[in-house]
Every structure is written in C-alpha cells, then in structure tokens.
Amino acid sequence: MAQDNLVSMTRSLVAHGMAGTMELADEVVRIPASSYTDPALFELEKRQIFRRLPLMVAPSCELPEPGDYKAMDICGVPLLLTRQKDGTVGAFLNMCSHRGNPVASGTGKANRFTCGYHGWTFKNDGDLIGVASPQDFGAIDKAAHCLTRFPVYESAGLIWATLDPTSTLDIADYLCGYDELLKAFEFDGWHLFSQRTLAGPNWKTAYDGYLDFYHLPVLHANTFGSDFYNRANYFAFGPHQRLSTPSQFAIKVSGDDDQQMDLNAMADDQLPQEVLVQGVWTIFPHISIASFYGGGLRGAMISQLFPGATVGESYTTQFYVMEHEPTDEVAIKAAHDQFDFLEIVVRDEDYKTGKRQHEALQSGLMKEVLFGRNERGGQVFHQWVDKLTHASDDELKDIFAREMAQAAE
Ligand code: FES
Ligand SMILES: [Fe+2]
C-alpha cells in the first residue's frame, strides 16, 4: 500500500513534468502578518503545538544501542530519551522525583542515572531504584516516584514523543500513515554522520522556507544555482506534507558519472527507492527531510526546528544521516563538505533572510502576507497551525482520528 502510494505520487510528478504543469492551490491565501510577530500567539503556539503534539525528537540512529541517552530542552520542558535494555525507547521528564533536578545532561551512555543533587538513582527505564538515606523518607513508594513518562513512538527510524504525560492522542493516528511512507528511506539502518544546531528567526518564518521551492533559484542563486526549477507538487497526509519537483527525469547518482533516468520509460517496479522518496518530506510541525549525495554516498539532512526564547528566535538541529558510514578519508571529507555547504545555505541565505523579514514585519506596518497558488505548502501549514492552536484536547483527538480513518480508506 505504501509502495503503491509512492509510485502513484511519482507517476503524478512525471505526468506534470511532461505537461509542464504543477498542481496549483485553489486561491491565493493571505494571513495576518502579526501571526509571525505576536508574542502572545507565540506563547500559545508553544503550549498548544509544541507541548501538546507529538514531536520528532531524534532519529533512531542517534540512540542506536541500549544505554544510549540524550537530554534536551524543548519549549521549557526538560526531556530525557533513552534506549532501554529491550531496545525500545523511553521518553521521560528529565526531573528527579525528589526535588526536580535534571538527572542527565547532554548525550552519553548509561544504564542508570544518579541525581547530582542528593543522589537518588533511576534506571534508564525510569524506575527509581535508590534513595539516599532512605530511613529519613519512611516507607517511600518507589513505584510512585519513577521518572515521569511521556508517550513515545518509534517508526521509520525516527522517534516521536509527546511532551504531555497525560496526552491520550495516539501518535500513530497523529502521523496519518505518513510514517509508513517514510519507511521507504529505511532510516532504521542508517548512521548519524554529524549534527549541529543553528539559530534562526521566528519558527514559522523559518519553516516556511522548507515548504516552498519558489525561492530556490532566487535566494539560493549563488549556492544551488539560478536555473533551479521553482515549482513543486504537494502531497498532504493530515498536516504532514511532502513536496517534490514535477519532472519526467531523475538523476541516478553513482559517483563520477551521474546518469539521467527517464522515469516515464520505466516500469513501476524499476523505479529506485531514492526516486520514490525524492523531494522534501516535512513532518508537522517542525521537521524537514531532504536527500543529498555527498561524494556520491546517499545521505539525508533531517532538520529539526524548535521555537526559541522569544517570538523572533528559533533554533534548528541539522542531523546529517547516511545510508552507509563513509570510511575512507576522501568519502569522509566529501560528506563533511556536503553538510558544511548545507549549513551555509540555511544559515547565510534562508535564516539570514528570515531574520531580516522578521525585523521588517515587526514594524507592524504590513497587515498581511501572501501565499500564491504555487505555494500550497505554506497555505496548508499555516491553516493547520491555526486550527491546532485553537483546538481543545478533545477536538485534537477527533481531528486525528478522522484524518487517520481517511488515510486508511
Ligand atoms: S533533587 Fe535529585 S536527589 Fe534530590
Ligand atoms: Fe531555502
């Protein structure tokens, strides 16, 4: 079913490519400029979107082995991810049940965490196993003082967690079947080559850039080139969207002599997996995945975006994951060069522009911004942000139960 879906998306892209067309949105959409600059709305979005919806918190290859852990802070919530003994992932509130000190920081390997304040100890599945000077706490119920668990879900080589321990929103429902398609990347066998974190503008300003190809030949003329095709077709799965260039052709990357493939002349079962997943895969509200070939080796950049401390700030962790870990010096350098190039593109072109745009919008002198019929990705993204920001918890569950039912039809 997922394979059929990937093939039919590719066939649609080929047909549009041959006809020189793209799928346009019904109308031009205007949204209030204040939705990028209003501090009250920004706080509401952090609460209603980032602290309530499942977030893709790590690629599985960041925590490949039992004992691996990562601590991170998302919108003021300290999160601890662990790879447990049985191979599953645990997601916990990174706060000691004694008086709230975080029990871990950074990344590393540990089967247990001893709190650095008074020495209480937890297993990496969250269980409290040691209380310092227990006689002074009486008959403390250890089971009632575990680390607080967050809902967590691992699929397609990616890990999601919901930063609300009481959430009953099913993470698979939230994904609307999209993770079944993402499995075509086969990320669960990939390697994390490198990662870095960049500062950016308002999180929606930054995310807009991942959702359009319209800007590519203009803003990225000096990096990607000015002849880059600026049109994309959008495929939506609930709030999650894949965008890809309508084209009859794809490049077969094979090191020195890349070849052009005519997809129209190929049977469905001849279409390579990397063609079936080409383009940009966004995962609402904050992830973008795109394929790259540093030195001919297959890789992908997974960009993970979070709101920053103020409405005009965000930060993005870029994970460069590779199908095969490069081993020789030349291949390692080529992968680094590819990743460094992407840092320049995003930092010096996308985010630099986003920051200038944000400063200008903050003047308050422009009331609305526009998304053209060719920018359906941005239209859909902002509609979902608006809808989910204002939905009650019950409505949220209904929305995704409906989306999941539709996806299954
Ligand atoms: S706060 Fe952790 S042991 Fe006291
Ligand atoms: Fe860009």
Image (cartoon, rainbow, N blue to C red):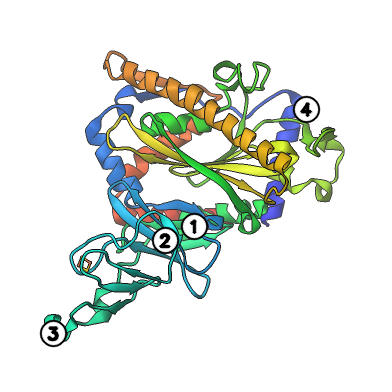
* CA–CA distance in space, label 1 to label 2: 9 Å
* Element at label 3: loop
The residues tagged by marks 1 and 4 sit, at their Cα atoms, a distance apart of 38 Å
Which of the numbered marks, if any, corresponds to residue 81? Answer: 2
Mark closest to the chain's N terminus, 1 or 2? 2
- Report the residue marked by disc 1: 159
Q: Nearer the viewer, mark 2 or mark 3?
A: 3
Residue 105: horizontal and vertical position, in percent? 35, 56
Q: Are marks 2 and 3 in contact (CB under 8 Å)?
A: no
Q: Earlier in the sequence, mark 1 or mark 4?
A: 4
Residue position marked by numbered label 3 in the rendering: 138
Q: Residue at x 49, y 23 (%)?
A: 348
Q: Nearer the viewer, residue 401 or 114?
A: 114
Task: Report x, y in % for residue 180.
Answer: 60, 56
How far is mark 4 from mark 2, CA to CA?
46 Å
**Residue at the right extreme, as displayed:** 265
Disc 1 to disc 2: CB gap under 8 Å: yes
Quarter of image, res 201? top left
The answer to which of marks 1 and 3 sits earlier in the sequence is 3
Q: Are marks 4 and 3 in contact (CB under 8 Å)?
A: no
Residue that carries the numbered disc 4 in the rendered image: 18
The kind of residue on which mark 1 rests is: Ile
Identify the mark nearer the N-term, 4 or 3: 4
Where 142 sits versus 160, above or below?
Answer: below
Cα–Cα gap, marks 4 and 3? 76 Å
Residue under the image location 82 percent in, 33 percent down: 258
> Does any portion of residue 298 appear in the rendered image?
yes
| Mark 2 residue type | Leu
